[in-house]
Image (tube, coloured by chain):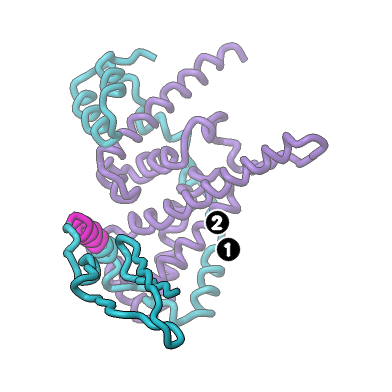
Chain colours: A cyan, B purple
Amino acid sequence: MKTCRVVKILFRILPVRAWKGNALERHINRCQSCRASLALREEARDYVQKPDELIASDSIWPAVEASIKTDPQALGRRAYPFARLLKPIIGIAALAGVLLLIFVQSKPPRPTDNSRPVTLTEDFRLDSVEAWGKPAQALVYQARDSQIMVIWVK
Amino acid sequence: MDERVVVKRCLEGDIACFRQIVLSHKAPLMAAALTILGNRQDAEDICQETFIQAYRHLSSFDSGRNLRAWLYTILYRRCLNVAKRKKRFAKVLDRLRSAPGAWIPSPDSRPASLAALPSGFYEALSPRERTVLSLWVNEGYTAVEIAAILGCPPGTARYHLFIVRKKIRVMTEKTRENLPSR
């Protein structure tokens, strides 16, 4: 099959079918050899089923009618007036969600009271410890980033 | 009767009017389904389903649009689903057939009524390309009209049409070359 080199290049360089189609259309209108390499409508008739030659089955309408009659409320029941808007709405909502997520993630964490380091001298003081009525020795443990304090008395 | 009036009367519950729609569009839809699927039983089922779905969604039909093109849109989507299902099923069958000791008869999906279509047609063209071909030949639709049915940009429809016409030309030339040797 003789094909113009332009067509081969177009097929190779253009990544999207729609672009290829539009470029091909423009090219074929000018290129005689490319136009000659395409089948005409008359030629293609042998490759499709033709409605006028086809004896369409008579069973189609009875089956359709039976289905409609068994469910008379079917007419318009599934018509969603906002069905066309559904896709754009979902798209906008998804985009808004992603933007919100990015905004939340990019925000630096605000220092809270909980994250403030506790200093023993400020909030906690132990003057004396007694165990079973006798003075005892107290040991105070606190992990560096924890607010839990363990007091060991002996 | 004007198509808009027929649709309006259908929406008012006149089943006889819907029958008129079915009778006037069933042959072209059946031809398209047969070209796409290559199986009469499947094509009949798809046509029935198309009309039932059209009846259910008739209130969403835009009266400014061509009714047949709208029916073709429904038909095309259903045909594509069937073709995908069949492809998956064929893969499973092939795997089973290749298993040792398994015997499964090869499916004869082409009834005798379709023998008129040239051999190699179903192998050479994808379901989408067969749809484009059927719409282009039988209805005389342009790439823009085909794109609206397929739900793709007009450029994509042009691309498919180009590929289909090229393949058909190749098949025709091969057939011509083979003729004198017979």
**Which quadrant of the structure image shows residue A131?**
bottom left
Labels 2 and 1 share a subunit:
no
B143 or B16, which lies in front?
Answer: B143
Q: Residue at x 36, y 33 (%)?
A: A41
Residue placed most toward the observer, B31 or A136: A136
- At label 1, which amino acid type do we have? Ser
Residue B104 is marked as none
* Residue at point 22%, 75% (across, down): A123
**Res. B72 in view:** yes
Residue furthest out toward the right: B101
Give the percent coordinates (x, y) of residue B163: 37, 29
Most frequent secondary structure within the magenta stretch: helix
Q: Is residue B110 visible?
A: no
Between disc 2 and disc 1, the foreground one is 2
Which residue occupies the foreground of this view, B44 or B124?
B124
Residue type at tag 2: Glu
Mark 1 — on which chain does it sit?
Answer: A
Q: Where is mark 2, residue-wise?
A: B44
- Location of residue B119 in the rendering, given as x and y in whole percent from the top left corner: 57, 29
Residue A98 painted magenta:
yes
**Magenta segment:** A92-106
In-image side of B178 versus B63 (left or right)? right
Q: Quadrant of the C terminus of chain A?
A: bottom left
Residue highlighted by disc 1: A59
Alpha-carbon span between mark 2 and mark 1: 8 Å
Q: Are marks 2 and 1 in contact (CB under 8 Å)?
A: yes
SS assignment at label 2: helix
Is label 1 in a helix, a strand or a loop?
loop
Along the line of sight, the residue nearer the viewer: A29 or A105: A105
